[in-house]
Amino acid sequence: MKSLFTYLTTIVFLTCIAPALEAQDKKDAITFEMQLSKSKLGINERLRVDFVMNKDGDNFNPPDFEGFKVLMGPSQSISSSWLNGVRSYSKTYSYTLAPTARGQFKIKQATIVIDGETYKSLPKKIEVTAAVDKPSDQMTVDDIADENLHLVAEVSKSRPYLNEAISVVYKLYVSPRINVSNFRPLDNPKYNNFWSQDMPFSKYNIQNGSYQGQSYRYVILKRVVLYPQKSGKLEIEPLSLDVTLDVPTNRRDFFGGRIYTQTNKTVSAGRRTINVKALPEEGRPENFSGAVGNFEFVVTTSKEDLKASESLQAMVKVSGKGNLKLFQLPEPNFPSALEVYEPEFDENVKTTLSGMQGEVSNNYTIVPSYKGKYPMPSIKFSYFNPDLGKYRSISSDEIMINVLDGPTDISSTVVSAVPGNKQAVISSGNQFNFIKLKPNLTAIGTNYFFGSKRFYLWLSLPLCLIPLAIVFGKRRKAIASDVAGNKLRRANKLAKKYLFKARKELGNKEAFYIALEKALHNYLKAKLKIETSEFSKDKIAALLSQKTVDTPTSEGFIGLLKNCEMARYSPFSDVQMQQDYDKASEVISYMDKQL
């Protein structure tokens, strides 16, 4: 009877204690596993990969995701709760992937260190099929960005004439649903077979507009004026941008506000084709020099009555709107008795989105040698008007130059014959002087150094340096006595020593954060004579606390180490890298004064 009682008591005890022991075992067991949103997806779908652990760890190392492109991640989420006196903890690293090809792929194992032990997730297979119709409720961050961000190249005219102005305006349209925090050009277009001129502006202005019938905000990024230099089909290369976006998610914060996530998107304006029409052969004037637009033409002189050997100015001017910098002005025919110098070209042209407008001119200096009347024949200027599709010609008036006073006897002059169709140059006899036969030359004297001004200057130089040496010595002594200042300078010097390599890698995210992490570890190694590469962030924080480093400095140091770890898998901007570099310099300086 006693044995039966003992047996029943044992059974009851085991029945009561077994669930508690099982719960304790489950609580103490550490798990680290990979979870997939789907094992089979279309090439146009997105895959979510979560690495879940029930205890916090360090040195998370994701797989290389062969066959997939990382669109976003890693993003971290932590959940903690208490149920029936038992604490539940979960930490997740999440990635959003896009397949790069069809076929069978394997996502390899990831690793993490928890309590000094390395845990590995199991690899999983993924099948990527042809594109499928995707429901709208499965849209990813990149899908939302694709639908709400557009880079457009607006061309004023797609079928211009040769040498007719067209404008290209690049606009970035952004939906009110998303926000743009930064952008940078990846590839600026080259306008081959075009004469181009950029239209710079001082700042970007955000404006309201519409795109495909919906309300958008847009900003003009670039404006350029083009003049095609070749007929036929000409291509305008696309402008590409790397844009950093804040995209809304389906999650909300404690106060009900929508949570945004950041992603990078590459957008392109697309390649545009311009069909350039050749200028018509019918009706083309013989003196046509390539002017296209709408112009006025005039030939004027500064005066018409003058004396021999006096000068006058003759100006050939074209004004209006068109390709003013891309054609030659007509040349006038001057009488042979006039001495004409090479013209001076002058332009007053401004370029707007509608093209060039203003005036260009050639200014000739003319000197008559003889008395008489000299006519300047009328000259013709021809251009093509693209609005009318026809050629137009303008003739100048004939101008009579009246020389009132001067020599008339041609036999007393010297005439130089010029071969070909060039005109002879006639000299008036007093325009050139003879070479001077009795020059006023002086002998070059010998310059001795001894006893000269330079000799006495060098002799007195050491005496002048004595006051400078005294001032310099006092300055060094003052610096040596400044204990606090010297300590701060040594701290800054040490910070620059360890951060020198990181500074050289600014702009290269991966290399920069690797160098920054090594600099932080090497600094602690040099100051505390320890190996920190095997220390976790918690151990480093405890070590700094033992060394009486203040809390803000210690937290700043640990925060930098976390940024170095997260930057390997997250998109960090150049601004963030510069901020981390400045923060590292400041933290090392503060720690050096406390250690």
Image (cartoon, rainbow, N blue to C red):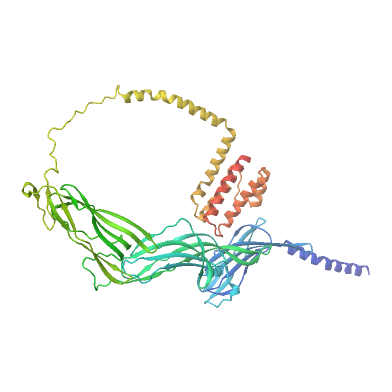
Q: Quadrant of residue 201?
A: bottom left
The C terminus - image quarter: top right
Which residue occupies 58% across, 36% down?
487
* Residue toward you, 254 or 501: 254
x, y (%) of residue 402? Answer: 16, 53
Note whether residue 228 is visible: yes
Extreme-top residue of the structure: 451
Extreme-right residue of the structure: 1
- Residue 444, placed above or below residue 167: above
- Residue 524, placed above or below residue 162: above
Q: How many marks?
A: 0
x, y (%) of residue 492? Answer: 55, 41
x, y (%) of residue 297? Answer: 27, 62
Q: Quadrant of residue 45?
A: bottom right
x, y (%) of residue 255? Answer: 69, 62
Which residue occupies 57% across, 30% down?
481
* Residue toward you, 182 or 489: 182
The N terminus - image quarter: bottom right
Would residue 398 appear left or right of 100 to someone viewing this image?
Answer: left
Would residue 37 appear left or right of 392 to someone viewing this image?
Answer: right
Which residue occupies 18% across, 47% down?
310
* Residue toward you, 481 or 180: 180
Note whether residue 328 is visible: no
